[in-house]
Image (cartoon, rainbow, N blue to C red):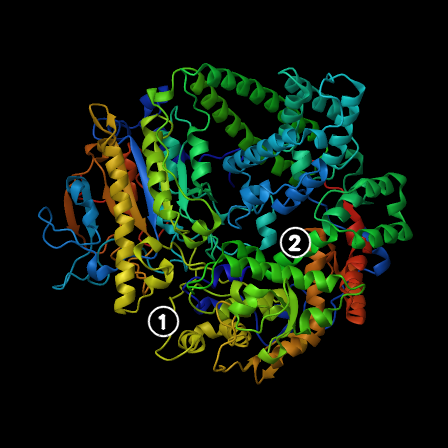
Amino acid sequence: MQRLDLLLTGCALSLLSACTGDLLGDASDPAASEPGGGGGSASTGPIPPGQCAAVAPPLEARLLSPSQYDHTVSDLLGFVSSEATATFGATSSAPRSLAELDELTVERLAGTADRVAVRAVQNLATTFSCSANATADDACVRAWLAELGRRAFRRPLADLDLAQLHALYAAGAAEGSSASGVEWLLAGVLQSPDFLYRLVLNEPAEAGTVVALRGHELATRLSYFLWDSLPDAALFAAAEAGSLQSDSGLEAELTRMLQHPSFERSVQSFYDEWLGLDVFAEVARDHADFGKPVIDSLRASVQATLRALYAEPAPSADELLGGTRYYMDSVLTSFYGLPAGPPGFSAVDLGSEGRRGIITHPALMTALARPDQTYPIGRGLFVLESLLCQHLEAPANLLIPPLEPIPEGGTERDQLALHSQGACQGCHARIDPLGFAFQNFDEVGRLRQPALDTSGTVANTGDVAGAFANGTELFERIARSSTVRECFATHYFEYALARQALLEGGQDSATNADACSISPIRQAFLASGDLKQLLVTIAKSPAFRHRLVAGAP
Amino acid sequence: MKLSPHRRLRRRELLRTLGSAALALPCLEILAPDARAQQAANTAKFAIFVYTNDGVYQNAFWPAGGETDFVLSDILSPLEPFRDKLLLLGPQLDSSNHPLTDTGLTYAQAPPQHRAPVCLTANVKNINLSLTKDEAQSPTTVNNYTDDTSSIDQLIAEAVKGESQFASLNLGMHCFGGDTVSDVNYLRGTAQKRVTSADEAWQRVFGDLVDASDPNATEGAQRALRRHGALKDFLHGRFSALRGHLGKADQRALDIHLESLGAFETRKQNLLEAGLGSSPGGCAKPTRREVPSDEEAVRTGSDTEQLSPLFMDIIAAAFSCGLSKVASVSFGYPGGGGEGGLRMPWLGFNNAQHGVSHHNEQAANVQKYSAMNKWTHAQVAYLMQQLDAMPYAGGSLLDQTLIYVFNRHGEGNAHTNFALPNLVLGGCGNHFKMGRFLKLPKTNPTNLLISLAHAMGVELNEFGNDALAAQGPLAGLT
């Protein structure tokens, strides 16, 4: 979700020569700017829907995210853990990729596992189901190890797996007690690649073929998609019984999973990623009253908004993108100068401020700003990438001058006008107007008064294109837009699969493998606008249920 | 690619590595005379690379006076006690003591938007600042550099590491919130992560050192060693159990993981064993200064006031204990504006440094910017003070340490690339002729990087690929 954002930020905000023509393609050519497939009609490849499964790519290993790690530990051991978020929570220190598993990250993973293991021993009665005097070879201990291992690794265990778990436990227990056995075992299990990665193991004979995910593989994919954690007993049981392989069996589990309290975890996780709200942990503003209470309440406000929305049987995209109710507590009503409401969070209608949908939520307006001013480029790029699935290709070897200061008595718009001239226009003509639409919300999300000019023109963006007289007109267009909804469905699809969608178009199944899965997903979402049903159609899609067995090294 | 199990050492890199003073390898005998000459006297044993953000207020930064009778500016005044250990590589100045355009250390033309990656790599060509999410998740993605670029500090660290436990201690204050994926320390294309919390930094370096006179601590350390061995057996067992069941990409990822794990395990074992027997270098755990770590202190940046000196204490003690020979410290995140860099509320204002650096010559901002510049240099002076207090080889650690303070900009307001406020400090093992303020014409900092390697006894005569294709050390420093 952030390519150009990485470049177009800081104090240097414009793209010079390289941002015109060559790398962006012709701005008048809609196809050139739709690698994510967001615009216009759904792109369909040459693969007939019936054969969709035959073109699935490999399901590559993914490291658990910090929140997945913590939720998995919580469900595995029965106490709430936030150790991984505490260690890796800062966005810049979380390992973004497997390639970043350097020595320091390995050390951090070891420290995280050690701390969880110590806590598990403090909660031994919850964690360990055998007697404190049980020896390593007691049947109870062996059964406990087998169950813990199966859940931690999210798959049936082989004899070798069991033997290794047993050996580690026995070595720890030999130091004195079952408590030290549990402590050593958990420190090992939580550093094991079987736990840290969502891994799918191959049978060598299958290499090169596309296969349906086996029961426990599909169960694990579903649980990380919808619960941000490991499968529960019922889901494992359904996997073992083979009932996930049928449409009706899968639908039954999906219905149950969407009603489960853990569903809220994945909703939070998706929106944090889609809206980029994970940066909120580090937000700081020069504004004197913008302290921890306001920041905590802003985060909680987003959660309350999503909780209320997803409490509906069929939460609607209309409400998500076009609603005018925002959840505020006394900290926020006071900070934003609104009438006090009842205790706790309650809905306040902010339509009269020109706000529409979650995209003008004060938390997002704050996240997309600078310590001391708004950030139209960041806001424009958010609309382009997160709402319109437009990906601006970053030119190589940029020479980007810093912004001139805001002119005396002027605004960020004047600042960018000075800046976005000549060769820079290639990118800025597309980014800046989208950002200016939000100019009435300042760097801490307050309504600016008097109102600023928020008009502009959107170029080359499906059914959002055209001039708008003010921001609210654009927000309402976004709320109704099919382009935006198709893009939203694509983002959720990518979240579910934990990889980028393969929608390059054309005949090459390797780069267009998801086209035939995503086309019906988008169509169904456009027709219903039902945010929960969207997840069901994604989970039932061929891309979600199949994989190519990758060749051995 | 980082951490590859099949590292390809280019011939040039091999020569650099073998040129190290610290590697007592038999094949040193076959090196060219000039490489061996570097091992003779007059090389420093320790190096610290201090990154500062957002330039300095140029109009009040440079000393007045001449090469040896210079008078330090207010911003630089904290360094006065060490004036005989300063090598100030300044620009040419006008009659108001303001720098002349395109004089002094000057980065090559047309660098990428944020110059930070270039600071220590001198590689302006192969930067990849725009990783997509998917690229970043790919097991085969390199970070930032599309080739195997290493920064000078990491090359030096690898070359001089010897028996020390940490090739390079990388620390940083508030290293988050930037908006370019950008850094200054690279090893074979990959940015080196930094430790940013007081607890983690302390635990990492001194956590496993026990007081050998305490019998309980010794018993605990012996148990920790047994636990370490059992965990190691288990984890290596897991990695081998999976082998043969993974696709190519997954196996590659796990190979990288396993190599990092092996390095961590070896170091952990060494530290545990060192804790049991004679402490490395005969050193004791230093006293730990308190650093506030509550969320509010971190959010407002008030923790930095204590975090910075703690990091300096850790570096000095780690050098003294023989745990490391190279360190880097970053004041803020090198990756652009974002959350705005360091805040220094103890100076009486809460603005983030980035906004202040774009001061537009407004008096209030200039005053804040200069105050932040001065505080940063006071921290460097504190570091020198700690090193100076530690005896080493008949003198002090400071005598044998090279400190390079560097910045991605000259002046923050306009992101200038000349008059870089980069300083060479410390005794530097008598390699450089110190106690001087030079007013340089336009000078490629790449030559200076080569000089720094030479000062550490690491032979290399070409480095980087910037437009000036720098070769050889900077003249006039030794």
Mark number, residue B9:
none
Chain bearing tag 1 is: A
Q: Residue at x 68, y 77 (%)?
A: A463
Secondary structure beneath dot 2 equals helix
The amino acid type of the residue labelled 1 equals Glu
Upstream in sequence: badge 2 or badge 1: 2
Q: Nearer the viewer, residue A412 or A177?
A: A177
Q: Nearer the viewer, residue A471 or B431?
A: A471
Residue B153's place in the image compared with B465, above or below, is: above
Q: Quadrant of residue B404?
A: top left
Residue B63's place in the image compared with B416, above or below, is: above
Instruction: Pinpoint residue A538: horizontal percent, then vertical percent.
Output: 78, 57
Q: Quadrant of residue A400?
A: bottom left
Q: Is residue A468 visible?
A: yes
Left of B167 or right of it: where is A451?
A: right
Left of B103 or right of it: where is A155?
A: right
Residue A117's place in the image compared with A532, above or below, is: above
Instruction: Pinpoint residue B349: horizontal percent, then vertical percent.
Output: 33, 60
Q: Residue at x 63, y 41 (%)?
A: A81
Q: Residue at x 22, y 55 (%)?
A: B104
Q: Nearer the viewer, residue B382 or B162?
A: B382
**Which quadrant, please, contains the N terminus of chain A?**
bottom right
Q: Residue at x 47, y 82 (%)?
A: A450
Label 2 sits on residue: A269
Label 1 sits on residue: A404
**Farthest residue toward the bottom?**
A469
How packed is label 1: few (under 14 Cα within 10 Å), some, or many (20 or more)?
some
Secondary structure beneath dot 1 equals loop
